[in-house]
Amino acid sequence: MATLGRRTFVALGALAAAVPEGLRPARAQGRLQDAILRLNFTPWGMHAQYYAGLRQNIYRAEGINLEIRPAAAGQQNEVFIAAGREQFLVANADGYIKSRAAGLPVVAVMADQPDTPFSVFALRTTNISRPEHLRGKRITWFQSQVKGLLDPLLQSGGLTRNDITFLTVSRGAEVQMVAAGQADAGFGFSYGQPLTLEERGFPCNVMALKDFGVKFCGTSIVANEREAGRGDLTERFVRATMKSLIWTHANMDTAMNYVVEVAPDRSHALEVRKLRIIYEMYRSPDFAERFGRFDEAKWASSVEYLAEGGDLQRKPTARELYTHQFVDRIEEAKQLSALVHGRPAS
């Protein structure tokens, strides 16, 4: 499946901005409003809170009739949100920044994870454990990923992109290719593919980008900019998501049952293990006072990495990439911050 070209991406951005309000899918259904959440991948542990909120009627209690959809092919996820055909997206920072640089009217309204979870992983039997060990190696890559994200890790080993070979793969194939030796290393989430390989008897070395001094944003909730400007639906969605995260913290096993129902190939125990690691990552200084807040310096650093790699049509300012207006109004953001940091709720 081909990645959207630059001209197509810009054209779709212009089209998205021009879509009339009346064509938006969200409509009142009695007291409920339809909304669609698009995921960044097929469902797995990191999405447990959204399915929990759906099944526990948390979104419905906020007046939202939520539909959850898995990731689309290529870079179309942000396009759907920008066009108003869908309202919310769990977005990886690299793809989101690229879409904003291309002029798509989307905005980050809540941090999902404070730091980039991306890493390079390789079987221990390959003896690849440092960036310099990647010279001449084959690494799996998704078409939608931005190669500039890898540059800081390569540079720390004295390498450039010319020193490795990118193997474009479909989602899910990277685990099989690394296990079979068809790829020397993979690019993915530090608590994702490596743990899956370990579960299957293939222990891995993991080089997490953040451990090499990379200041790069993690995953975010991205909204249609026009919808976010109206405020009501977006605020209710963010509040419901916070409540869902609180509920999931105390009910991880049940929450993961909901994920396995829609993704039966997932291992329940393994995905719960991943989810516990994610909640440990939430104990970040970024979330010290309110869960979901962004670090502006981290956005600026993220933009610089991608711009230096030649992956952006323009350099968006850090401040245009996000808003705190919803997180700062929602009481549950303070409650969730206290919960993940082990503090009594004020």
Image: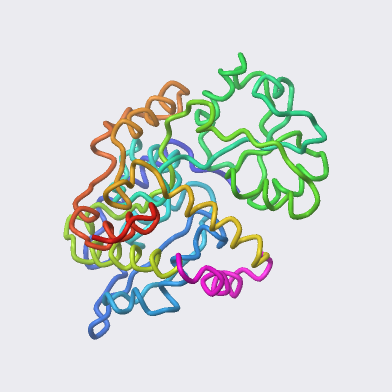
Q: Nearer the viewer, residue 76 or 63?
A: 63
Which residue sits at x=61%, y=71%? 260
Which residue sits at x=78%, y=29%? 127
The quadrant where residue 264 appears: bottom right
Judge whether residue 263 is colored magenta: yes
Q: Nearer the viewer, residue 105 or 290?
A: 290
Total marks drawn?
0
Magenta segment boundaries in residue numbering: 249-266
Q: Measured along the vertical axis of the image, is residue 251 above or below residue 184?
A: below
Q: Is residue 129 visible?
A: yes
The quadrant where residue 8 appears: top left
What is the magenta segment's predominant secondary structure? helix
Instruction: Please state if 230 lies on the left or on the right of 301 as rendered.
Output: left
Q: Measured along the vertical axis of the image, is residue 172 above or below residue 263?
A: above
Q: Residue furthest front?
A: 344
Q: Position of residue 206 (x, y in %)?
A: 65, 37
Which residue sits at x=52%, y=23%? 152
